Image (spheres, rainbow, N blue to C red):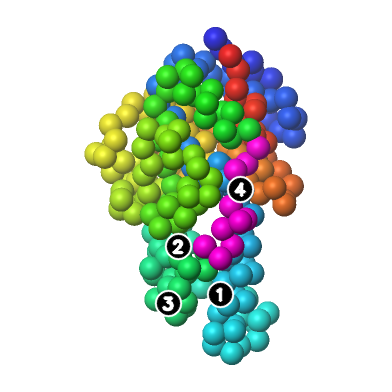
């Protein structure tokens, strides 16, 4: 059955937009974790507020100035494996980052309609892979809270692949770990740069998540089909 195509580039804000592909043509489903399956508010709060607060206490620094300095440090490695490497940040900041992540684990929450979508895919017999830039330690912490692991065929971190999803070589290296046909693969992510990388490799069915954080308004992509949540992808 072909999904209803009411999506238009000129009407991105509609909650009634649907992908135009046919689920029967899709064999493999790749899903990002943070901002796609899980509420990105946890990560935003952790890195923008909680870590700066802990860092300023540990080093006896002024909190607001510390936040500004750390944001610059984050940006210097954004889009690389170091950005999500908890061991790297523990060493660089002299903080136990995994322990701090666990302290606010109550903020790890599943985004609306994610579970329904995963069961929909399972019902249709799709191979579902969690493909994340998150460090394996982060993945373990979040899945302990979210309890979604059993719904995936496999979970793969960028650290295992040897490149971040934003990097072109990621998708080629992923092929050696997980053979897949890019023409029959669906991939959803909340980051346009990651979708650009996937598109360049030839992945055909791309969806942008417009509302990765429940605390922020939706931001629709000008390049990719954008959905507010996965309810728009569930069509029997």
CA distance for labels 1 and 2: 12 Å
Q: Nearer the viewer, residue 143 or 67?
A: 143
Of callouts 2 and 3, which one flags the residue occurring earlier in the amino acid sequence? 2
Tag 4's secondary structure?
loop
Question: In x, y percent, where is residue 144?
Answer: 48, 50
CA distance for labels 3 and 4: 28 Å
CA distance for labels 1 and 4: 25 Å
Nearer the observer: mark 3 or 1; the answer is: 3
Nearer the observer: mark 2 or 4; the answer is: 4
Residue on which the image places disc 3: 92
Nearer the observer: mark 1 or 4; the answer is: 4
Tag 3's secondary structure?
helix
Of callouts 3 and 4, which one flags the residue occurring earlier in the amino acid sequence? 3
Q: Residues within 10 Å of mark 2 (few under 14, many from 20)?
A: some
CA distance for labels 2 and 4: 22 Å
Q: Is 103 included in the stretch rendered in magenta? A: yes
- Which stretch appears magenta? 102-112
Residue on which the image places disc 4: 109
Of callouts 1 and 2, which one flags the residue occurring earlier in the amino acid sequence? 1
Label for residue 185? none
Q: Residues within 10 Å of mark 3 (few under 14, many from 20)?
A: few
Taking 30 as reference, is 98 above or below it? Answer: below
């Amino acid at each position: 059955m072909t999904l209803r195509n009411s999506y238009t580039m000129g009407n991105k804000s509609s909650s009634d937009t649907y992908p135009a592909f046919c689920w029967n043509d899709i064999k493999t489903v790749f899903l990002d974790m943070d901002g796609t399956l899980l509420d990105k508010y946890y990560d935003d709060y952790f890195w923008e507020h909680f870590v700066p607060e802990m860092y300023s206490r540990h080093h006896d620094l002024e909190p607001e100035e510390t936040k500004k300095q750390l944001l610059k440090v984050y940006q210097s490695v954004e889009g690389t494996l170091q950005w999500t490497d908890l061991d790297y940040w523990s060493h660089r900041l002299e903080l136990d980052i995994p322990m701090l992540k666990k302290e606010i684990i109550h903020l790890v929450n599943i985004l609306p309609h994610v579970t329904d979508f995963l069961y929909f895919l399972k019902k249709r017999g799709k191979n579902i892979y969690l493909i994340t830039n998150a460090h394996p330690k982060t993945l373990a912490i979040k899945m302990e809270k979210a309890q979604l692991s059993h719904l995936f065929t496999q979970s793969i971190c960028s650290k295992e692949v040897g490149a971040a999803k934003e990097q072109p070589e990621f998708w080629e290296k992923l092929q050696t770990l997980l053979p897949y046909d890019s023409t029959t693969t669906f991939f959803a992510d909340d980051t346009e740069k990651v979708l650009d990388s996937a598109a360049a490799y030839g992945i055909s069915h791309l969806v942008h998540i417009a509302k990765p954080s429940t605390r922020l308004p939706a931001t629709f992509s000008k390049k990719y089909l954008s959905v507010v949540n996965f309810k728009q992808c569930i069509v029997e």
